[in-house]
Every structure is written in structure tokens, then in C-alpha cells.
């Protein structure tokens, strides 16, 4: 072994640990060896890490953190492994433990709900520590689902007595009257993502029981006017489609013993021209108020198909280019006069 190299040994307790840690057909090998100056040598129930002292040590620490996670009964996914490797490459291997140890709740089907990125972890901490949280970020960053998970957890632990979940039904507009059914049936399509999240977290039977007893209320934003919501976990989803007036109305509904989370993506505003987004405006108005947290999630926090990150980045670059071209045209027009 060369003078500047070293080795460490990981002891695995069985084949399942090996598969989770190294991936099916050892697919994680190349991911690690491409990024770090090391070589991985499997030897029975041992894994030898050999290479530069610095890289060997950091990969050894990463493996130990992941093994501790696996040994607590969690099934490590390829995506989680890749994210842990990314944190390690950024010198943030210490974030792995706090990230994977943050268990929000276990669903009725045994699914463990945890943050999958550092941004999501920061989002959950904000909800725990603040009565009002505004979460802004692109699609796929878990804004709504994690807020619902925290709401369900608060309900199960009797921190609140009910959940109130709402969305602006701006897409309905004048077309609402043409849809079949009563008012609830007309707006249900716009609330479908909330239903889907709660079905997954609670199961359909429990959800329906809570709904019938009034423990869970799902309604369009317009239904919130004139109410005071005590002992409730309140979520406003798709907040970018709430007008300034609606946002003020919603935020002032909060009563004693309640929490509110507002989520949205300010790059996907569907309001008619001339109407200003309340979510785009709120951070400027509320940023200095103690007890209110503002959390920005980015494409780095996307937990959908890997292509979604690339799509979001491509659109951001395109929008930036359009903005630059727009200003160049305006400046050229001014000079021509």
C-alpha cells in the first residue's frame, strides 16, 4: 500500500445489509469510486475501503451512518443512498444522521415518513418551531405532503383537535357552474391532491371516519372567510393562487392553539392578469414578525423522478433568458428615442 493510502473495514451482519449498502449488483460501487479516490473490496461479510486517507475516512463514516439507519429497520433506497453520497461529497456527512433519524410518523401501512433532503428537514423544523410557516418551492419538493404528515402527526398526538385543509379553486372561475353536482362535488377535483395525500397517510377508512366526524375538513379557500380556527392545524395549499386579499383573510383566521402552513410555487401562478399573488407578496410583509417562518425549497429538494430536477432547472434558465432579453429590448427602445 502506498504511503499516503490507508484502509478501513466495515463488518456487515448479512446479505440484506450488503444489498442495501452496495446496491443491487453492487451498483453503488461505481458511484462511490467515480467520486472518491478509493477502492471497495468485498470480502465475505466484510467490506474493505482502501485509498487516500481522507476519502477512506469520510466514506467509512458515511457507511457507518447508513448502516445505523438500516439496522433500525429502514429500507435504504437508491435515491437516499445517492443523496447521502452527495452530502458526503459536499463535506456534509454529519447531516446524514440528523436527516435519516427524523421520523415524522409511520402510516397505517407501515410506511415511514421522513425528510429526504436537507431542505425538507429544515422545513419540518420550521413547522415544529413556528405557528405560521410559508413554504415556497417548485413541484415535487414535498411541500404539501410533509405538511399533511405533520398535521396528521399533530392530530394523532392530540396537539390539535382537527385539520382544516384548503386550496384556492381559481381554475374553476366562471366554469364552476357548468360542472355537475353540488358545490362540494364541483370543487373536489381541485382538492384532489390533498385527498390523495391523506389517503396515503391515514388510509381511506380512517380518513372517511375523520371526515364524517368533522375532525378533517377540506374546503375551498372562499369558505374560510369569517371563521376563527382554534386548536387546528390549517394548511393552505397552492397558496400562489390566493390573491393578496385572500392571503390576508386566511392568515387572520388563526385562533388559539393552532398552526398554519401555506405552500405554493410562485413560478406557477394561475391568477388572472391584474391580480397579485398573496404568496408572492407575503414574505415582504411578514418577514420581520416573530413566530412566522419562511422556507424556500429548490430543485435540490425535488423527490420525484430525477428528470424533474432537470426540467425545473431548464425552465429556470429559460425564464432568466426571457427576462434578460425583455430588459435588453426595453433598454434598446429607450435609447432609440
Image (cartoon, helix red, strand yellow):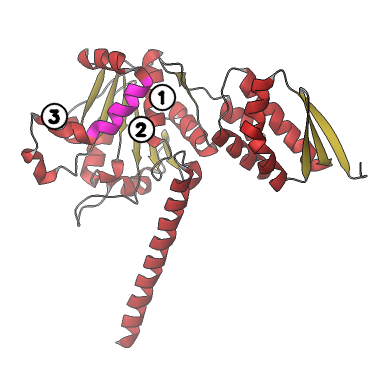
Which residue appears at 36% of the width and 78% of the height? 331
Q: Determine the secondary structure under disc 1.
A: helix
Q: Is residue 20 above or below residue 241?
A: above
Instruction: State yes or no: discs 2 and 1 in contact (Cβ < 8 Å).
Output: yes
Which image quadrant is residue 44 in? top right
Q: In which quadrant of the rendered image does the N terminus lie?
A: top right
Can residue 252 be seen in this snapshot?
no
Depth check: give the residue in front, 290 or 237.
Answer: 237
What are the residue bounds of the magenta stretch?
Answer: 191-201
Magenta stretch secondary structure, dominant: helix
Give the number of the disc on residue 185.
Answer: 3
Density class for disc 2 (Cα within 10 Å; few <14, some 14-19, many ≥20) is many
Q: In which quadrant of the rendered image does the C terminus lie?
A: bottom left
Instruction: State yes or no: discs 3 and 2 in contact (Cβ < 8 Å).
Output: no
Q: Is residue 11 left or right of residue 184?
A: right
Q: Return the disc, 1 or 3, that comes first in the chain's sequence.
A: 1
Which image quadrant is residue 161 in? top left
Disc 1: which residue: 150
Residue 265 in percent (x, y) is at 35, 46
Amino acid at each position: 500500500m502506498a504511503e499516503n493510502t490507508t484502509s478501513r473495514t466495515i463488518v456487515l451482519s448479512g446479505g440484506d445489509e450488503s444489498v442495501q449498502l452496495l446496491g443491487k449488483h453492487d451498483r453503488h460501487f461505481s458511484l462511490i469510486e467515480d467520486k472518491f479516490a478509493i477502492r471497495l473490496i468485498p470480502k465475505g461479510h466484510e467490506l474493505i475501503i482502501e485509498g487516500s486517507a481522507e476519502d477512506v475516512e469520510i466514506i467509512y463514516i458515511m457507511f457507518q451512518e447508513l448502516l445505523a439507519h438500516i439496522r433500525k429497520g429502514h429500507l435504504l433506497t437508491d435515491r437516499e443512498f445517492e443523496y447521502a453520497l452527495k452530502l458526503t461529497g459536499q463535506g456534509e456527512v454529519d447531516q446524514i444522521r440528523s436527516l435519516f433519524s427524523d421520523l415524522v410518523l409511520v402510516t397505517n401501512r407501515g410506511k415511514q415518513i421522513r425528510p429526504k433532503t436537507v431542505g425538507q428537514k429544515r422545513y419540518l423544523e420550521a413547522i415544529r418551531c413556528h405557528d405560521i410557516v410559508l413554504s415556497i418551492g417548485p413541484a415535487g419538493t414535498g411541500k404539501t405532503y410533509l405538511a399533511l404528515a405533520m398535521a396528521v402527526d399533530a392530530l394523532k398526538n392530540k396537539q390539535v383537535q382537527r385539520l382544516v385543509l384548503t386550496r384556492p379553486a381559481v381554475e374553476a372561475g366562471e366554469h364552476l357552474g357548468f360542472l355537475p353536482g353540488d358545490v362540494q362535488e364541483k370543487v373536489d377535483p381541485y382538492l384532489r391532491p390533498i385527498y390523495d395525500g391523506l389517503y396515503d397517510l391515514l388510509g381511506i377508512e380512517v380518513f372517511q371516519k375523520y371526515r364524517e366526524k368533522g375532525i378533517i375538513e377540506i374546503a375551498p379557500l372562499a369558505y374560510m372567510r369569517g371563521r376563527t380556527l382554534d386548536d387546528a392545524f390549517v394548511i393552505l395549499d397552492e397558496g400562489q393562487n390566493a390573491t393578496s386579499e385572500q392571503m390576508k383573510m386566511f392568515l387572520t383566521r388563526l385562533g388559539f392553539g393552532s398552526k398554519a402552513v401555506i405552500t405554493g410555487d410562485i413560478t406557477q401562478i394561475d391568477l388572472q392578469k391584474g391580480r397579485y399573488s398573496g404568496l408572492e407578496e407575503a414574505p415582504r410583509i411578514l418577514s420581520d414578525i416573530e413566530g412566522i417562518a419562511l422556507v424556500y425549497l429548490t430543485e435540490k429538494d425535488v423527490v420525484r423522478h430525477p428528470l424533474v430536477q432537470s426540467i425545473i432547472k431548464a425552465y429556470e434558465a429559460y425564464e432568466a433568458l426571457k427576462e434578460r432579453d425583455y430588459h435588453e429590448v426595453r433598454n434598446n427602445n429607450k435609447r432609440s428615442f
